[in-house]
Image: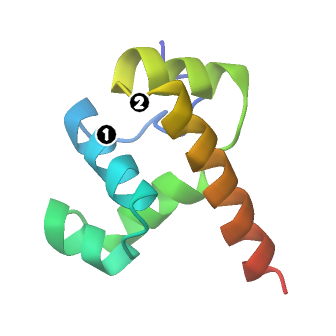
Amino acid sequence: MDTVGTPVYRKHLPGDKIRLIYRLFLEKNSIRSIERITGHHRDTISHLIKDTVRNEKTEEYLIKQIGLTAGECEKLWALLEKKRGTSRE
């Protein structure tokens, strides 16, 4: 499977919805606003985002399969790091 080792492994979301969720997250939309826009439950969205970790396989999947740019991936990593840093305090 090409999704093994990525945050979408065993998630039943189509690629276009995953792309939309990440792009809305990159625009700093809240989980609840992403829920309203996509129609997916906030737990599904938050699990996808929470499970996103920076590694070569994930970045390759996000660029080649999902269609994010390298710049968007860098912004995603920075935003995730910031969110995770503030949630631990």
Q: Of helix, strand and loop, which one carries label 1? A: helix
> Height in image: 64 above or below 74?
above
Neighbor class of circle 2 (other Cα within 10 Å; few <14, some 14-19, many 20+) is some
Q: Tell me which label, 2 or 1, sits earlier in the chain.
A: 1
Distance of mark 2 from mark 1, alpha carbons?
7 Å
Residue on which the image places disc 2:
68
Q: Are marks 2 and 1 in contact (CB under 8 Å)?
A: yes
Neighbor class of circle 1 (other Cα within 10 Å; few <14, some 14-19, many 20+) is some
Disc 2 marks a residue whose amino acid type is Leu
For image coordinates 60% across by 28% down, the residue present is 58
Q: How is the image coloured?
A: rainbow
For image coordinates 27% across by 76% down, the residue present is 33
Q: Of helix, strand and loop, which one carries label 2? A: loop
User: Residue pushed farthest front?
Assistant: 71
On-image quarter of the C terminus: bottom right
Question: Which quadrant holds residue 4?
Answer: top right
For image coordinates 31% across by 39% down, the residue present is 19
Residue 55 % position (x, y): 73, 29
- Observer-nearest of 36 and 24: 24
Residue 39 in sight here: no
- Observer-nearest of 56 and 10: 56
Residue 31 % position (x, y): 38, 74
Tell whether 12 sits left or right of 36. right
The circle drawn on residue 19 is: 1
User: Residue pushed farthest bottom?
Assistant: 89
Disc 1 marks a residue whose amino acid type is Arg
> Height in image: 45 above or below 53?
below
Question: Which quadrant holds residue 24?
Answer: bottom left
